[in-house]
Amino acid sequence: MAAEVKINESILSLVEGDITNENTDAIVNAANARLAGGAGVDGAIHRMGGPAIMKECRKIGGCPTGQAVITTGGNLKAKYVIHTVGPVYKDGTKGEAKLLKSAHLESLKLASSRGLKSISFPAISTGVYGYPVNEAANIALKTVIDYLQEHTDIELVRFVLFGNETYDIFSEELRKLI
């Protein structure tokens, strides 16, 4: 399954799949603030990418919620991993939306600053961090659309979504935004 829209000169794409198989210039890791590896997407990226990623994460030391840092892609097809820390969802009134928007925006800015042309995102904060998928999808997609309307340097932004249910929710939110 895939959905694709053109924003300015760029493509925004949704696919159901495994982000560790992506060959975009960078993939985004839904990391924790200590950059210590973990469960879900984070664990899968570290397992597939090998020890070079963790070695660079240890040098960096950490990443505050809503910010982003970059490391090698190690053994992954992607040359780089952009590690961003999404918020843990509490009740939606603790600044979670602002932090989730920032996690996406800082990842895009980092990709642009490095001259990267393509980037793949997972559904940040929707796993163990408990963010409702429909709200997270709306924030993520709106942030990317707004960015691509202002910046033409990134040619492809792909959301690689794990499972049909998450893909369907992102597709529905995308339809509402375009």
Image (cartoon, rainbow, N blue to C red):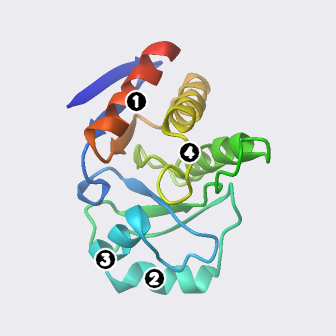
Categorize mark 3 by other alpha carbons within 10 Å: few (<14), some (14-19), many (20+): some
Tell me which label, 3 or 4, sits earlier in the chain.
Answer: 3
- In front: label 3 or label 4: 3
The alpha-carbon separation of the residues under discs 4 and 1 comes to: 22 Å
Q: What residue is rendered at 66% in x and 69% in y?
A: 63
Q: What residue is rendered at 56% in x and 86% in y?
A: 58
Label 3 element class:
helix
**Compared with residue 64, is residue 37 higher up or lower down, i.e. above or below?**
below
**Compared with residue 9, is residue 86 higher up or lower down, i.e. above or below?**
below
Q: Nearer the viewer, residue 117 or 127?
A: 127
Q: Position of residue 129 (x, y in %)?
A: 56, 57
Q: Nearer the viewer, residue 101 or 170?
A: 170
Tell me which label, 1 or 2, sits earlier in the chain.
Answer: 2
The alpha-carbon separation of the residues under discs 3 and 4 comes to: 24 Å
Residue at the disc numbered 1: 169
Residue at the disc numbered 3: 47
- Residue 178 showing in the rendered view: no
Q: Is residue 82 left or right of residue 14?
A: right
- In front: label 1 or label 2: 1
Amino acid on which the number 3 mark rests in the picture: Arg
**Compared with residue 95, is residue 40 higher up or lower down, i.e. above or below?**
below
Amino acid on which the number 4 mark rests in the picture: Leu
Residue at the disc numbered 4: 108
Tell me which label, 1 or 3, sits earlier in the chain.
Answer: 3
